[in-house]
Amino acid sequence: MEKLSVKNLTKIFDGSIVAVDDFNLSVKEGEFVVLLGPSGCGKSTILRIIAGLERPDSGEIILEGKRINDLSPKDRDVAMVFQEYALYPHMTVFDNLSFPLKMRKLPKAEIQKQVHGAAEILGLKDLLPRKPRSLSGGQRQRVALGRAVVRDPKLFLFDEPLSNLDAKLRQQMRAEISKLHRRLRATTLYVTHDQQEAMTLGDKVAILKEGRLRQMGTPLELYRHPAEAFVGEFIGNPGMNFLTARVEGSGELRVASSQFSPPGNISRVFRNYTDRELLLGIRPEDILLSGSAAEAISLEGEIDLVEELGNETVVRVNCGEHQLTARGKDYGELTIAQKVIFSFPWSKIHLFEKESGKALTGPLS
């Protein structure tokens, strides 16, 4: 069942700055959807429009079958958790949690019940008498979450709630939010620019660029089948590598001044693009640094950067006009300026149009 529908949403600032451009989104009951994209892509603006904090220039927001464009924020029955904790410093944790319930004039007994229920879920029971200044960053964020949970809204909105926390605490809070969602099964729209956060939290991820929706799907769908080069580069750590290649009339592929003959089952794919330049996409983990390999494109390059990460190594290789990143284990001793032969299997290549970046195929396997 559809819980939230956003139709043809557009928002323009100062008469010319298009923050959101004909954006459409459908969120099912109980679904956790992440809006992901670089800074300035419009994701927070979309969240603020849904919450009623900004007015769209055009488009509709439908929540549980009801158009809410003209409702005030307090009448939309949505709860928003901001990047800043936005806690009342002079109030205890209990008073912070109970404040939205008092505004709704609920009976004291009901307020007590709901606050203690939210505190139990989020591990805040021992913190109820304390004030925000005596809490850690993670505890303050849990209080901010609790203030949303206690309202039992139709829709949860999260605007980069973990960006002020350090890396270890972000990881812990991701687990807390994931556990909270599994317990409540609340419909959630979550904004972040952190693709790891998006991949670990979202049932679905919507990729935005320049105010437009570029692709939406499960994390694995986006990773395995990016609809355009931008998505391939944005999803993955590091992102997808790209090389310019030309399909010759002979059926061979010219890459970095070298020519290669695709194997029979794959050559049929390339024959569709004879005399055209394409972008070849290859994931860093699919690049081998152990020399030439069968059924693979092999090129020579020079190491530009080596990052030892303990369980794996990230290596940047310059190859003519191209710069590629490889990620793997057991590379052995590598040094800057070292010449290497690297290769990647034909079966792992993604093809994209050079000009538009639109995907022509998924992996060729």
Image (cartoon, rainbow, N blue to C red):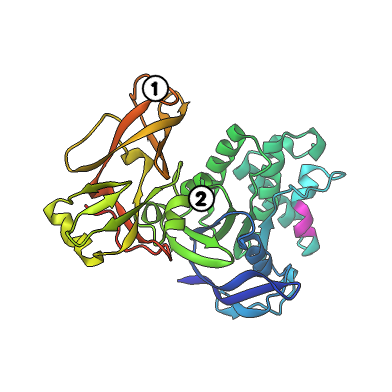
Task: Find out whether residue 100 is within the magenta segment.
Answer: yes
In the rendered image, residue 206, in percent from the top left (x then y), is placed at 49, 61
Location of mark 2 (residue): 198
Location of mark 1 (residue): 334
Q: CA distance from mark 1 to mark 2?
A: 33 Å
- Please name the amino acid that badge 1 sits on: Leu
Which span of residues is magenta-colored? Answer: 98-102
- Please name the amino acid that badge 2 sits on: Ala
Asked which secondary structure carries label 2, the reply is helix
Residue at horizontal 17 percent and vertical 59 percent from the top: 250
Q: Residue furthest left?
A: 264
Viewed as shown, does residue 142 lie left or right of 266?
A: right
In the rendered image, residue 31, in percent from the top left (x then y), is placed at 48, 60
- Res 109 quadrant in image: bottom right
Residue at horizontal 61 percent and vertical 79 percent from the top: 59
Task: Find out whether residue 177 is within the magenta segment.
Answer: no
Viewed as shown, does residue 241 lie left or right of 27?
A: left
Mark 2, residues whose alpha carbon is within 10 Å: few (<14), some, or many (≥20)? many
Q: Nearer the viewer, residue 13 or 319?
A: 319
In the rendered image, residue 239, in percent from the top left (x then y), is placed at 44, 46
Tell me whether the residue at label 1 lies in contact with that at label 2, contact meaning CB atoms closer than 8 angstroms. Answer: no
In the rendered image, residue 202, in percent from the top left (x then y), is placed at 48, 53
Q: Residue furthest top?
A: 333
Quadrant for the N terminus, please.
bottom left
- Res 212 quadrant in image: bottom right
- Res 334 quadrant in image: top left
Q: Residue furthest front?
A: 257
Residue at horizontal 27 percent and vertical 52 percent from the top: 254
Mark 1 vs 2, N-terminal side: 2
Viewed as shown, does residue 300 lie left or right of 169?
A: left
Closer to viewer: mark 1 or mark 2 = 1
Asked which secondary structure carries label 1, the reply is loop
